[in-house]
Image (cartoon, rainbow, N blue to C red):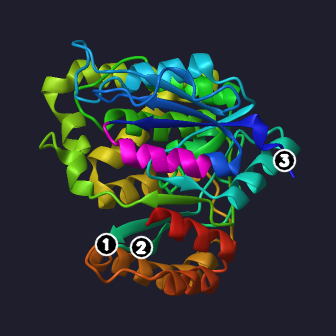
Amino acid sequence: MSDLNNLTIVIPTYNREQIIRKSIKYWESIGVHILVLDGSDQRIFQDGLLNADSMVAYYSFPRNTSDKVVSGSYHRRMRFAVAHVKTKYVAICADDDYFLKSGINKALQILDDKNWIDSVFRPCADYRLVDGDVYWNLEYFGWRDNGFGTSADVHTRVTRTDRGYINYYSICRFEKWKDLIQLCFESEFSHSQVNQFLMDEVGKILLRTAILDDLFYIRQYNDPLKYHSEGISLGDWLTDDKNSKEVERIKLILRRALTLADGVRDFDRVIDFIFSFYTSGFRGFLNKATANFQKQFYWVPQSWKTKFNRILPRRLSFALGYRGKVHTPNGLHLVEFKKILEDNHIPFDSNELDELADALI
């Protein structure tokens, strides 16, 4: 088993004292290093280790006048993390989300054994607290590791059709993660989703990512509507002429990421492809991906169509139910959720899920 002492979990938080206290309690039971970066108006603890023997370090970053949004100290916090993480591996985790210990152990084993792998990712589940009970759903599963994420070919990683590749929720080698964070958080943007966009896309460029079969990450459901508080979608923001200077900065960051990668043939074309997913709509993206990129940039395994026909209908029907109904009180209780995992052949530790469910209430 890998040494959990080699991992730091970076936890940003903002004005949620009870939630971060619950999170700290969970992580102390796991036995990894914790770096809590608090943007709250009032500090909870004194800066530094919670006590002499603690693996939990806490630092306060109250908002200052230069921050563009209320929790704008996030950029300062991420840059602070780069300077203060001292372990071989690192991951970002929201204060109400959790990596499972069984998933952490398997991820660290992969990173220990395979030095060409930069990060380990997914599968992920959502939970929602309703009237003192926990409702669960499989947020994303995707294909089992078919070589897309671990490919040394940057074009393969960038132009993959599976776009659910969020590097916020992966365990990474620190040196690669440092490059990722420094590029993605060197400056702020006027749309709150730009840094998520950069984490996704720069992560694909820089990181060769293995996808676990096992349940790995548990995430608190968040209403997607709250992410559009600007009143404009990211796709519309990217195509608005008023934001052209910021968009050029984004393209420059992507270009700098591509210069760090090996074997990239055409920077402008890769960047155009990335933007097409966000600005052309799903149908436009599929048409462009099929017509312009499939033959040139990535190879689709012969088994892909078989996997699609065999796996997608069951998962799609579940996903549609999840997206459409689960956020009413009709979510899945833990017993039902475990059955979904079993039906989809996703390994999990039943006792571990039971313990986490108790801790969430």
Residue 222 percent location from the top left of the image: 32, 57
* Above or below for 154 versus 303: above
Residue 268 percent location from the top left of the image: 44, 28
Q: Which residue is identified by label 3?
A: 2
Q: Which residue is identified by label 1?
A: 130
Q: Residues within 10 Å of mark 2 (few under 14, many from 20)?
A: some
Labels 3, 1: front one: 1
The amino acid type, in three-letter code, at marker 1 is Val
Q: Are marks 2 and 1 in contact (CB under 8 Å)?
A: yes
For mark 1, give the secondary structure: strand
Q: Are marks 3 and 1 in contact (CB under 8 Å)?
A: no
Q: Is residue 340 magenta?
A: no
For mark 3, give the secondary structure: loop
What stretch of residues is rendered in magenta? 15-27
* Above or below for 2 versus 286: above
Residue 238 percent location from the top left of the image: 24, 35
Q: Which residue is identified by label 2?
A: 134
Left or right: 144 in relation to 271: right
What residue do we see at 61% from left, 47% from top? 27
- Tell me the distance, in whole angstroms, between the alpha carbons under discs 2 and 1: 6 Å
Residue 134 percent location from the top left of the image: 41, 73
Labels 2, 3: front one: 2
